[in-house]
Image: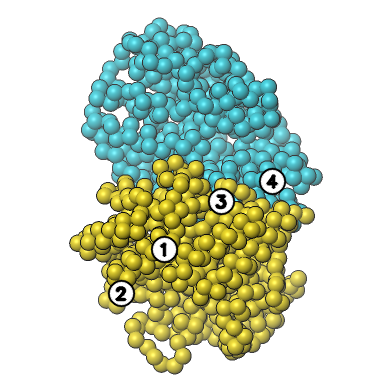
Amino acid sequence: MLPESIREELRAIVGEKSCLDKQEALVAYSYDATPMQQALPDVVVMPKSTAEVQQVMRVAARHHIPIVTRGAGSNLCGGTIPVGGGIVLVLSRMNQIVEIDEQNLTITVQPGVRTVDIHQAVEALGLFYPPDPGSMVISTIGGNIALNSGGLRGLKYGTTKDYVLGLEAVLPNGEVIRTGGKLMKDVAGYDLTKLLVGSEGTLAIITEAILKLIPKPQTQRVMLAMFADMAQAARSVSDIIANRIIPGTLEFLDQGTIRVVEDFKQIGLPTDVAAILLIGQDGEPQTVDRDMEQIAAICQKNDAVQIKVATTAEEADEVMTARRSALAALSRMRPTTILEDATVPRAAIAPMVAAIQEITGRYGLQICTFGHAGDGNLHPTCMTDARNTEEIERVEHAFEEIFAAAIDLGGTITGEHGVGIVKAPYLEWKVGAAGMEIMKGIKHAFDPHNLLNPDKMFAKQSRNRVVVQRA
Amino acid sequence: MLKEALVNKLDYDELSNCMRCGFCQPACPTFRETGYEAASPRGRIALMKAVADGVMEPDKDFVDQMNLCLGCRACEPVCPAGVPYGQLIEQTREAIEEVQEHPWWVKAVRKLAFFHLFPHQKRMYQLGGLLRFYQRSGVQKAARKLGVLSILPKQMREMEAIMPEASGKGIVDFFGGTVIPAVGERKYRVGMFHGCIMDVLFNETNRNTVRLLSEAGCEVIVAPDQVCCGALHAHSGEREQARHLARKNVAAFHKADVDIIVSNAGGCGAMLQEYDHLLAEDAERQEKAQWFASRVKDISEVLALIVEPKEWQSLPQRITYQSSCHLRNGMKVTKEPVSLLQAIPGATYVQLREGDRCCGSAGIYNLVQPEMAGSLLDEKMGHVAATQADILVTSNPGCLLQMKAGIHRAGLEGKMEAVHIVDLLARVQQEEKPLSTPK
Ligand SMILES: Cc1cc2nc3c(=O)[nH]c(=O)nc-3n(C[C@H](O)[C@H](O)[C@H](O)COP(=O)(O)OP(=O)(O)OC[C@H]3O[C@@H](n4cnc5c(N)ncnc54)[C@H](O)[C@@H]3O)c2cc1C
Ligand code: SF4
Ligand code: SF4
């Protein structure tokens, strides 16, 4: 419990209405999109400016109160769960687009702007901000930057990190730093911009960002290719890229996902195929047409059972429906849906999917896999029931093996969702003991008193899980 | 106490089905207005679950938050997990109602309205007659002139100002019977759900509904013994009384043996369509409830199926459409009203920006939550004004009144009128063909 005097200080900074400590507010900010994780903060603070963030940070620093920064709370790694109580700092009210600079092709935004609002604002001017996480209708750019979020266009256009040019951020001592700027080149010292991207709110609070824009591609086309064998689908992915075509979208669904989607939507997907690839290209109309033809030929050569190229907007929408409905379809199967995230080099997709299927069978679970085939980022998704503690035990073991398999294949424990609390026990597997030491050193340099998002990224002990059960 | 009531009433499986993805948030008017997690569907579900889990005591803030929800159900269609939020909020309100101590006069008004007025159609007509007397006899004029209405809260005054002319007679009286034959060859036998307030305050809309159906080849049965749909009851936590009304309606229409049950009020239609859920624990009536629920259609769906827009008169005006929440999110009817409006010869259809967002009317929400309802309405009217439409169409009486109030508030009177879709279609329907025995 925070003493009343500290609450007074916080109220004086942000105002009565933006400093909440009633039960309702504490419960409402005790969770994010991560299944089974929940912890109550002591107080919720909603600042409206960098200056307010600074003052709140100073109060926290003076009294050693943990601060968890929150955007929309759509992350899947437990990143915004206030495991040690303290302040939840909600940035959704700092949601202004500060400037769109058409001369320099940049946009300057406050952290609470929703990703989709950035898309709409720049596309209206014929410009393009490519990162498009599946959650973009709710996620904030601050959250995207803090987690270095990716999306369907990662293969061709990269992820959030490739578009952040400069940041304004509040350090744990209340100082404001500015990194980068409207610059395409900048090698002055360590690259603090890149260091803050993906830092999961553990180093500083991002209060403004300058993002790079590119011209909007002229056309976009999509196709579905269905395969009787996962290996052939994977080979098609490698062949497409070996042929020097970089598709704008290259997604896949495994058989389990296809069945569930077809069951749910009845869009006429063949349920006996092992994998479906959703392939899209954007750019100049002629190039797009040529690429689409070549891609179709490559899939044909790899024994695609069926290829469906969309010729009209309605057909394109129909084709996209398969991928878009995946989560909705899976989440209706059982009460709890655990959407995980592991990445392997794209040549290892087939063995990785095989490994996931083997592990799933061995533990007697329901796990379907879909994801970004182009960049090797897979989302094994488990349908379970949090109330069944025995099954949840098995789920945890299965995922542990899945992450281990990813590492064995040269991959990583998370490609876009972040470490947070959920993956903290496995981070060392990926970065090694020396890597952990350096990372802890960086954390200490920024945040010597461990105030920002404590217990995230670095697990207290090797296995640290908070499963809330019905009382 | 409230805690036990909630634990008993809430469907824990559905609470667990919410995966907290937050996809429902952009659709929620109260979240957009406040930016506050607890005022979002995800937040409200989390609060309900926290109570069920014993993490939270259901205090006054909890109750206030549940009351701030419009019940517009915009959060349902966008939910990947298919969480039936509407049912959860009704269960919550039922529990709250069970333990809530109202002041004596609220109790009296609720009892009067929910138990002694709405369920008794005859009394509704009597009240309609009284209201008509008030409006016609000059008392209304006098009251307005003398300023006695100023004792009413602002929202009530606004409502009084736009109150349509009431009727003391229902459609059965007007048509002189409960069976109105089809003009020409009979295509369907349609049961007309006339609603409780609808038949008193919007009797003309009901008459137009019958006329349009009959002229398009439907035999219309105004099933006798039908009663209020119970939506107001269910949304206010009186689910038991809603069940009681549902049983009566199911029996009345089953007896009438109709192919389709048509509603011209989105709020009622959505309720009628959920009778199978409402009566889920009533094993005896399950089959009939399903029979009933599966036949309920909105008037626009039926008309889109059977009318011939080619025969319509030209209407050279700009038309826009505010979709009613329960029609859209409950009955899932979105295309038909728009395609009917687009088919009107000579008319220009302009899409209303955020025409799929709640107008703030939401039953009696605008009376009990005037602040939130007011700011939603003002935002809505900004978009409405931007369409520069001559006619603003809706498909639910509550929304229609709210739009009229909005036009009044935004100073658009004389520039724009709000009309129920049925009344507009009746306007463009070529001159009336003779209907059977209108009195
Ligand atoms: C259905 C669904 C689909 C998803 N699809 C994708 C996807 O395709 N790709 C992907 O990468 N992710 C995806 N996600 C995960 C998530 O939506 C993203 O990681 C998103 O970027 C989180 O944004 P947010 O605003 O919700 O951040 P939050 O969840 O609020 O916060 C995320 C982390 O960032 C920190 N943080 C937030 N704002 C700031 C700030 N201003 N300064 C410092 N730290 C901050 C928080 O402390 C936390 O650690 C998905 C999630 C869901 C539920
Ligand atoms: S969209 Fe559905 S599952 Fe997601 S938070 Fe809202 S109610 Fe829950
Ligand atoms: S019913 Fe409407 S107001 Fe209530 S939570 Fe859903 S979207 Fe929000």
Q: Residue at x 67, y 45 (%)?
A: B13
Q: Nearer the viewer, residue A469 or A391?
A: A391
Mark 1 CB near ligand 1 (8 Å cut): no
Residue A430 lies in quadrant? bottom right
Q: Which of the two discs, 1 and 4, sits closer to the camera?
A: 1
Up the image or down, B139 lies above or below B382; here it is above
- To the question of a shared chain for discs 1 and 2, the answer is yes
Q: Which chain is yellow?
A: A
Q: Which of the two discs, 1 and 2, sits closer to the camera?
A: 1
Disc 2 and disc 3 in contact, CB within 8 angstroms: no
User: Seen from this angle, which residue lies furthest right?
Assistant: B1
- Give the colour chain B carries in the figure: cyan
Disc 3 and disc 1 in contact, CB within 8 angstroms: no
**What is the three-letter code of the residue carrying label 2?**
Leu
Q: Which of the two discs, 4 and 3, sits closer to the camera?
A: 3
Residue holding disc 4: B12
> Residue B162's x, y, as percent?
46, 34
Up the image or down, B421 lies above or below A416; here it is above
Residue holding disc 2: A105
Question: Tag 4, which chain?
Answer: B
Label 1's element?
helix
